[in-house]
Image (cartoon, rainbow, N blue to C red):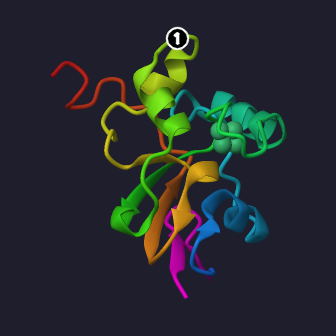
């Protein structure tokens, strides 16, 4: 069975092939619905608590379940239409589109990601607005 390693939480779980990343994270007690991270500690904490409950519950609409697949991207399904839209269309959700900067190839929506092999996941990835790729 594939293993999901949640890097920040230092937690590893075994999951059935084809399982949904967000669903498995919730079962394991890991919150993937963070919306924004990297603003400030107080704001991040408030936003994470709010987003944990105020989200689209896996419909691929809200974008709060962004995660960074730090290893094993090839062991996930292809980008879904919902993910491509979040990545490419900055209207009406510019923050969610900006969040992909610096992690264009590895950022996924946990609710639209299925697992077919071992992966490592960074939950609540921070915005990288001034990273190496921002002005290139
Ligand atoms: S839970 Fe809303 S996009 Fe994933």
Residue 34 visible to an observer of this rendering: no
Residue 9 belongs to the span the image colors magenta: yes
Q: Give residue 83's position: percent from left, percent from top.
A: 50, 38
Q: Is residue 58 magenta?
A: no
Question: Is 110 left or right of 85, judged from the image as shown?
Answer: right
- Which quadrant would residue 117 be assigned to in this image? bottom left
Residue range (magenta): 1-14
Query: Residue visible at 65% across and 39% down?
Result: 60
Give 98 or 38, whichever is nearer the viewer.
98
Which residue is rendered at x = 55% and y = 36% of the image? 82
The C terminus - image quarter: top left
The residue under label 1 is 91
Residue 125 in percent (x, y) is at 49, 44
Q: Residue furthest bottom?
A: 1
| Residue 83 left/right relative to 31 | left
Disc 1 is placed on an element classified as loop
Choose top left, top right, bottom left or bottom right for residue 33: top right
**132 with respect to 49 (left or right):** left
Q: For the point 51% across and 73% down, which residue is it?
A: 5
Asked if residue 54 can be seen in this view, the reply is: yes
Kindly indicate the quadrant of the structure image that contains residue 74.
bottom left
Ligand 1: give its quadrant: top right
């Amino acid at each position: 069975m594939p293993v999901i390693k949640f890097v920040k939480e230092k937690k590893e779980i075994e999951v059935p092939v084809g399982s949904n990343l967000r669903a498995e994270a919730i079962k394991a007690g890991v919150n993937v619905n963070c919306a924004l991270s990297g603003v400030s500690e107080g704001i991040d904490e408030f936003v994470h608590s709010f987003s944990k409950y105020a989200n689209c519950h896996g419909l691929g609409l809200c974008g709060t379940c962004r995660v960074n697949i730090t290893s094993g991207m090839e062991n996930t399904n292809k980008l879904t239409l919902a993910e491509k839209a979040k990545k490419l269309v900055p209207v009406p959700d510019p923050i969610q589109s900006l969040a992909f900067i610096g992690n264009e190839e590895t950022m996924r929506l946990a609710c639209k990601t299925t697992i077919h092999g071992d992966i490592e996941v960074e939950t609540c990835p921070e915005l990288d607005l001034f990273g190496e790729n921002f002005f290139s």
